[in-house]
Amino acid sequence: MTINRRLDPFTERLHRQPPQHGPVMLMYHAVLPTAQRPRWPWAVAFGHFVRQLDFLREQGYATPTVSELLADPARYTGRTALITFDDGYVDNLDAASALVHRGMRATWYVVSGSIGCAPQWPFDGRPDERLMDAAELHGLLEAGMEIGSHSVTHRRLTELDPESRRLELVDSKASLEQMLGTEVRSFAYPYGAFSDECARDVQRAGYRSACTTLPGWALRDRDAYQMRRLTVFNSDSISTLARKLSLGSHDVGWGHMARYAWRSLRTASA
Ligand SMILES: [Zn+2]
């Protein structure tokens, strides 16, 4: 049985259409070694994650890192899904092995003030585990993955005074670069909180890009400092993921699909 048969007929027809709006970026956090659906909505079960990777691979998705995409966007006009992980949980090492095994790449946004220890920011329901340490992050780089910054302390940049915000950006970049021995080019806003001022500060700190948690096609705003991402929830079936990839949206429930089908029909018959 191929993975494709897991799609319902509507989704399969939708997903067969060529991509029209460029790459999508998927956002993951924890990937837990459990068969149950994790309680934290931002954590997915490992087996679930692997099925999603197999689907992407079988459907011919390119999975460049964020820097690879931005260095040569013209190369990624076909099906392209960027895989990103926020925070840097140690369970992500198994996820990385699954990616390597399939010849896929991803980008990690790590919190520089919590490297190798328990997250130092307020508890938000996340699993009880530490973040990856320096040696583990080196291993990811050697496997062709990208490491970006997710600030020093995981505070909302929009709530900080300009100097504190600058330090979150500059200090995390400098300490990660010193630790990893390579340029850190990419940033992800903690909690997705950003403003035009934040985006300017990210650029001033020397990053080449930043991603938000606004849903949509990754480059919809044509602004490397406001890239959009789609959250992969632990309740998403393969069909749900396929509709997210096809439509660049979180709004892929059947109510939305009925309206989408109706609009397409009207456009086709107009
Ligand atoms: Zn985060």
Image: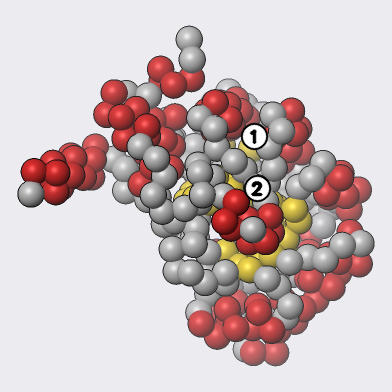
Ligand 1 lies under 8 Å from the Cβ of mark 2: no
Q: Which mark is in front, 1 or 2?
A: 2
Residue 59 versus residue 148: which sits nearer the camera?
Answer: 59
Residue 44 image position (x, y, % from top left): 56, 37
Q: Quadrant of residue 104?
A: top right
Q: Is residue 153 visible?
A: no
Q: At 44% across and 56% down in the image, what residue appears?
A: 217
Which of the two discs, 1 and 2, labels the residue nearer the N terminus? 1
Relative to 33, residue 183 above or below: below
Vertical comparison of 165 with 16: above or below? below
Relative depth, front residue between 225 and 152: 225
**The image quarter in which residue 58 lies:** top right
Task: Please tell me which residue is depicted at 91% across the width and 67% down the height of the picture.
Answer: 178
Which residue is under mark 2? 64
Q: Position of residue 266 (x, y in %)?
A: 10, 46
Q: Which mark is residue 201?
A: none
Q: Which amino acid, by three-letter code, is at mark 2?
A: Pro
Residue 242 at least partly seen: yes
Element class at badge 2: loop
Residue 149: x and y, percent?
A: 72, 64
Q: Amino acid at mark 1?
A: Leu
Percent across and percent down for residue 231 are 49, 49
Q: Which residue is mark 1?
A: 32
